[in-house]
Image: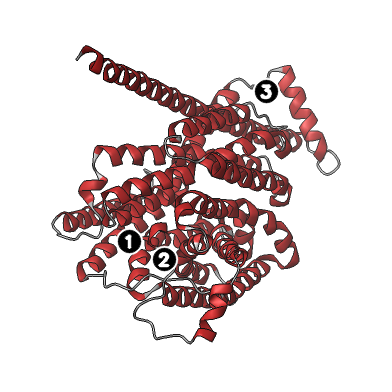
Amino acid sequence: MAAQETDSEPELAAPVPPAAAAPVRTMPAFAYFGASTLLALAQGFGMNMIAGNLPQFQGAYSATQTEATWLIAAYLAPNVSLSVALIKVRQQFGIRTFAEWSIGVFVLVSILHLFVTDLQSAIAIRFVAGIAAAPMSGLAFLYMIEKVSPEHKLTYGLTAALTNIALMPSLTRVLFPALFDLGGVHALYLFELGLAMMAFGAIYLLPLASPPRAKVIEPLDIISYLFVAVGFGALAIVLTTGRLYWWLEAPWIGKALVVSFACLAAAALIELNRKQPFFDIRWLTSPEIVHFTLVLLLFRLLLTEQTASATNFFLILGLQADQLTGLYSVIAVSTVFGGLLCALVIKPGREPHIHLFCLSLIAIGAFMDSRATNLTRPHDIYLSQGMIAVASAMFLPLTMGQGLANALKKGPNYIFSFIILFLATQSLGAQMASAAFGTLITLREKFHANVLAQAITLTDPVVANRVSQLSATYGHTLTDSALLKAEGTNLLSQQITREANVLAYNDVFLLICVLSAGAALCLLAHVTFNAIKNRIRDRHAAEAPVAA
């Protein structure tokens, strides 16, 4: 994608007078970097606005947690697949037209948020918002690499763009508490609208250079994409809400999965019988690409420890969003540091060693988090979460650069297939990982709660004394001893549930540590084997002329 951007104007565009073109050439690079940051912030704010403030939105719309989660599902359903189609849309209609229409729709949807009054309308608007926000991350990427020299686009430019995008989830969560205190949910919508208007101005002031337009969209592309969109959308909804409805309890979950797999199978069947496929199934299922896909999914699975598990752990303990701003600030700073470190060390051939370093950081950080207790607070995991943030910032640019380089060796047609693969593993992979760990936490919490409850009986003097201490808080309002004992028992049950949750999260953190350490050992063995094989091959090559 980065290699396709050139410094030439579209051949189909009308001639531009020199006076009008001069400002485009003299625009400084930092203006484009600022526009990229603004676009990434607008996209990241909208994507994380609901997930970072779900309890607040529950109260604003008088909804349960399960009902409010549909706000997230509605946003993700179109968003996970639309970025794929927009790549060809951008090629056919030109980057300039694409950017102007994209930001215009984004501003319009941000305005519509201000008129939301109930949950049903909010879900509908969030669905449209998922469509409108899909181009934003791509535009943020293009603006970041616009002024980077061609030889550095896949190294420094790629690293800066992905670090910029990865920074936004933690940065936006730092802003949420202050905005919510100012005006609740309405203040969040107003701030999003302000970001959209600023991005609107930036896009019109700073036009992107565009390659010549080409007719790349075919009728079968539209049919294939519709199947992919329905398949990915249904899967995203199931992964987002399945844990709350529980996988085997709601019949519609099975029906949605059948629809998803049937649509994806239909898309694959169409593409396998095309001369110019929308995406190359045969290449995507080759051993090399399957291995690459598993690596992407593994890292996305491991990085869920930070994006979901660590945050939810403190919410379970009763902490509020404003008490986590310090943690998010540390993650944001660590992400920037990781991006800078990646830009310094990125070089072809170093990928295995950097991956090994990232896996080691994740394993150590997850092990440190696995020793948490109910007294653990955000400042206790600054170091571990900072290490994981550095690993995350270093992994993505390196992996995407390696994948793009391999795709370019095959030919330009393979770039689109690789981008589909990368986007699918990052969007759907994140939902899969969150659903898997969320389900595991629920199961382990029930297990630990059962074990703890069996060990506690009211005939135990220690337990009876603890119930008496807990019930003493109601001694001034309740005089009935039976009611006091019942309240004390209820409070003790809440403490058991809290401890069971802590143990469940520790199990997940430890599992991530084991998976990271196992992956690091496998990678180390692979690198060692290749090094020995290359040394033996070089020795035979050196001895061959002597023997001759």
Amino acid carrying label 1: it is Ala
Kindly identify which residue carries mark 2.
Answer: 6
Is residue 53 positioned above or below 136 on the image? above
Q: Residue at x 61, y 43 (%)?
A: 311
Give the residue drawn at x 36%, y 18%: 532
Q: Secondary structure at mark 2?
A: loop
In this rendering, the answer to whether 448 lies above or below 152 is above
Left or right: residue 229 compared with residue 486:
left
Q: Mark 3 vs mark 2: give the one in front.
A: 2
Sort mark 3 into few (<14), some (14-19) or many (20+) by Cα contacts within 10 Å: few
Q: CA distance from mark 3 to mark 2?
A: 75 Å
Q: Residues within 10 Å of mark 1 (few under 14, many from 20)?
A: many
Q: Position of residue 118 (x, y in %)?
A: 56, 70
- Circle 2: residue type: Thr
From the image, tell me which residue sits under label 3: 458
At mark 1, the secondary structure is: helix
Q: Is residue 14 left or right of residue 262?
A: right
Asked whether 194 or 1 is in front, the reply is 1
Q: Position of residue 458 (x, y in %)?
A: 67, 23
Pointers 3 and 2 in contact (CB under 8 A)?
no
At numbered mark 3, what does the secondary structure look like: helix, strand or loop?
loop
